[in-house]
Amino acid sequence: TLHARLFTPQGDLPPLAMRRLKENAASDLPPKRRLVHARAMPKAQAEKYDAARLGLAYGRRGDALRLLHHIRAVSAHPDIDGSAGAPEDFIAASARLSLATEVLRMVKARGERALVFIEHRKLQHRFAEIARRQFGLADVPIISGETPQPRRMAIVDRFQRHLLKDEGFDLLILSPRAAGVGLTLTAANHVVHLSRWWNPAVEEQCNDRVHRIGQTRPVTVHLLLAAHPKHAARSFDCLLERLMARKRGLARAALWPAGDTPEDAAELERELSREAVEEPVEMRSIAELAGDRVKPVSGGAWRLEWADGYPGGLAVMEGGTSAHSFSNTVYDAFVVLSPSEPGGAFGDTAPTTSLAGNLITLWPHFTPVGALLGADRRIQPNSPDVA
């Protein structure tokens, strides 16, 4: 393989290339994990998505990229440029924004801090104002391409003051393209990607504002997926996550692949235009899916530990579990509800995702098993791959 030819010594000759990953060169850094949070789009958002997808399927060929960006925007919010209406209604209209506020409530309950990456400028300002009110903050600064350098450094210095005197929950909003490099923000240990670029290298640069020398806490990267109730794993966010996961795999195998290429856009266009919708699969028992990484907790629920052994990860709740008692066991996890479980009040303890209906096809995204199989593999009932 190319990797072997580049990085393996050839007889007495040294390898053609040497590569040191950050986890090898800076072994004292705390662990970093990714949590995928998915939620079904509300009705109005799903309808806007359907209209945008129809335009992609039947529009003119030259309009494909513009329509793809429109689908991307609708997946973030059906009225992304809107400024009217109550803050609660604006948040509730978007699956991603609803998830983001749940994640931030959990971060606040822990007394920790977060960076939220948002690309759209109007959405940056609207979300900053809503978050300021919801979380009782004096200010929610934004670092974007419009932020002058002196103002940018003042925001960073103010945020980093928590390293000298921990004042609890705080929040910064950043543009992934303008603020994804050159900043040290180790006072935060949560990164929330409310919108994502197509290039995983850009996303890793954003994560590295937090996961770098000086960080003392485990870092959690939260990936928010808005799933169409019908298309589920074929929704834009899920297809983008699949593309990003594949590119991350290529990056670890050799070198970072090319950035956002025309081929990426063409692949997303093809997948979004396909009419076939995956049929729901039966959820197997948690013990079968997770193997020796399953840890029973309370009332018929389980905790799945991530493959790197870092505490926390994912908890799965099935019928018969008391939401109140269960919430006490998932302080360092997020919750996936099986189709048989109606849900419950988890408060600020953990964001929840329901896998009812077609969303059960997203199951591989959430488990360590799914991560090992690859994001493009479906878990089939009685499959030997998940024994």
Image (cartoon, helix red, strand yellow):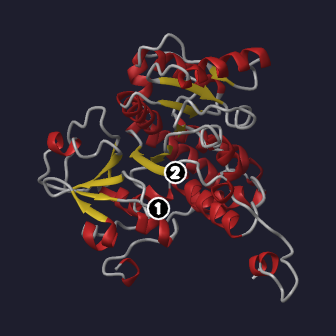
Q: Is residue 48 left or right of residue 144?
A: left
Task: Name the image quarter holding residue 230.
Answer: bottom left
Question: Which residue is labeled 2 in the image?
Answer: 31
Q: In this view, does 121 lie to the left or right of 387?
A: right
Residue at 63 percent across and 66 percent down: it is 249
On residue 308, the disc is 1
Mark nearer the N terminus (1 vs 2)? 2
Residue type of the residue flagged with mark 1: Asp
Q: Specify the quadrant that holds the C terminus.
A: bottom left
Q: Nearer the viewer, residue 199 or 120?
A: 199
Residue at 52 percent across and 37 percent down: it is 189
Residue type of the residue flagged with mark 2: Pro
Residue 48, given in percent of the width and then of the height, sits at 50, 39
Q: Which of 196 and 227 is in front in this view?
A: 196
The alpha-carbon separation of the residues under discs 1 and 2 comes to 9 Å
Residue 134, given in percent of the width and then of the height, sits at 40, 18
Residue 86 shows in this picture: no
Residue 312, given in percent of the width and then of the height, sits at 36, 51
- Marks 1 & 2, CB-CB < 8 Å contact: yes
93, above or below 72, in the image = above
Q: Which of 171 and 386 is in front in this view?
A: 171
48, above or below 310, in the image = above
Question: Label 1 crowding class (10 Å Cα cut-off): few <14, some 14-19, many 20+?
Answer: few
The secondary structure type at the circle numbered 1 is loop
